[in-house]
């Protein structure tokens, strides 16, 4: 019997397209500063190919494809990129709470205990509070607060312990096969993939990367859960 829902934020709840556009623009500029010209269309194709094969960081994979085998160039761009990305983590500027999340989270909270299961900064918690949905989560903590991030099994065990449920009583809902579906299935959780954002292009690279259910939007989740035992 399903008692709990673990909900990823980036993708299912947050629209992060502004951040992804910023990453692309920054990395193209960083490559140009290194004397490497890459057309934006080609860079996008490299990112898409990396996403499809479940690379953990598809943007850095695209950078390596442009600079290989020059490790020093890669390191310089990687460090600059980390600093750039950290700027978004401080306030998540441009990140939007999806309308369907505002509607679905209260519905789910009336049936299950909810836990956040997201690699996000503390700023994400503030966005949920501003959208008046944070109060519905029994586990309201993100990776920056926890000190552990997905796909580490400890991350999921911490959330499950915080909710007081066993893996077999929980459903992990996320957009990534590598960070959400795989580790959750390894722990014995049921998994639901939401096909939103760039990671909708991921392709399963093993049977453990195949979710138990796939939905196109979080709005479909309440109706999908009964078929999974909820």
Image: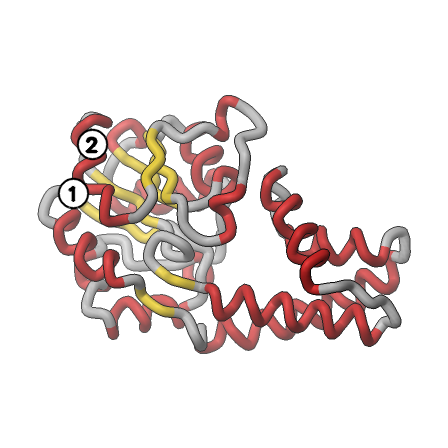
Q: Position of residue 197 (x, y in %)?
A: 45, 53
- For this orientation, the residue located farthest to the left is 110
What residue do we see at 32% from left, 71% from top? 127
Tell me which residue sits at (46%, 56%) in the image.
119
Q: Is residue 83 above or below residue 185?
A: below
**Quarter-wise, where is residue 105 in the image?**
bottom left
Q: Tell me the colour scheme of the image.
A: secondary structure
Q: Is residue 87 above or below residue 176?
A: below
Task: Residue under label 2, please give it.
Answer: 2
In the picture, the disc for residue 103 is none
Q: Using the image as rendered, state which of residue 45 and residue 141 is in the foreground.
A: 45
Residue for badge 1: 112
- Residue 164, position as x, y percentages in the image: 23, 40
Q: Is residue 91 above or below residue 132?
A: below
Q: Residue at x 67, y 69 (%)?
A: 81
> Residue 182: x and y, percent?
48, 33
Residue 91 is left or right of residue 68, and the answer is left
The answer to the question of whether label 1 and label 2 lie on touching residues, with beta carbons closer than 8 A, is: yes
The answer to which image quadrant residue 39 occupies is bottom right
Q: Residues within 10 Å of mark 2 (few under 14, many from 20)?
A: many
């Amino acid at each position: 019997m399903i008692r709990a829902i673990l909900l990823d934020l980036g993708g299912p709840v947050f629209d992060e397209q502004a951040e992804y556009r910023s990453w692309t623009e920054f990395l193209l500029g960083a490559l140009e500063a290194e004397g490497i010209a890459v057309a934006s269309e080609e860079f996008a194709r490299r990112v898409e190919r990396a996403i499809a094969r479940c690379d953990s960081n598809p943007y850095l994979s695209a950078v390596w494809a442009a600079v290989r085998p020059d490790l020093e160039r890669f390191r310089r761009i990687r460090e600059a990129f980390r600093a750039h990305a950290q700027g978004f983590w401080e306030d998540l500027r441009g990140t939007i709470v999806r309308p369907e999340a505002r509607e679905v989270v209260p519905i789910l909270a009336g049936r299950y205990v909810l836990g956040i299961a997201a690699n996000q900064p503390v700023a994400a918690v503030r966005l949920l509070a501003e959208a008046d949905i944070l109060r519905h989560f029994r586990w309201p903590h993100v990776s920056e607060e926890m000190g552990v991030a997905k796909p580490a099994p400890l991350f999921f065990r911490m959330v499950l312990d915080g909710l007081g449920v066993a893996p077999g009583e929980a459903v992990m809902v996320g957009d990534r096969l590598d960070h959400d579906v795989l580790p959750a299935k390894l722990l014995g959780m049921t998994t639901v993939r939401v096909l939103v954002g760039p990671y909708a292009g991921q392709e399963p690279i093993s049977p453990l990367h195949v979710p138990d259910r796939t939905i196109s939007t979080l709005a479909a989740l309440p109706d999908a859960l009964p078929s999974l035992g909820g």
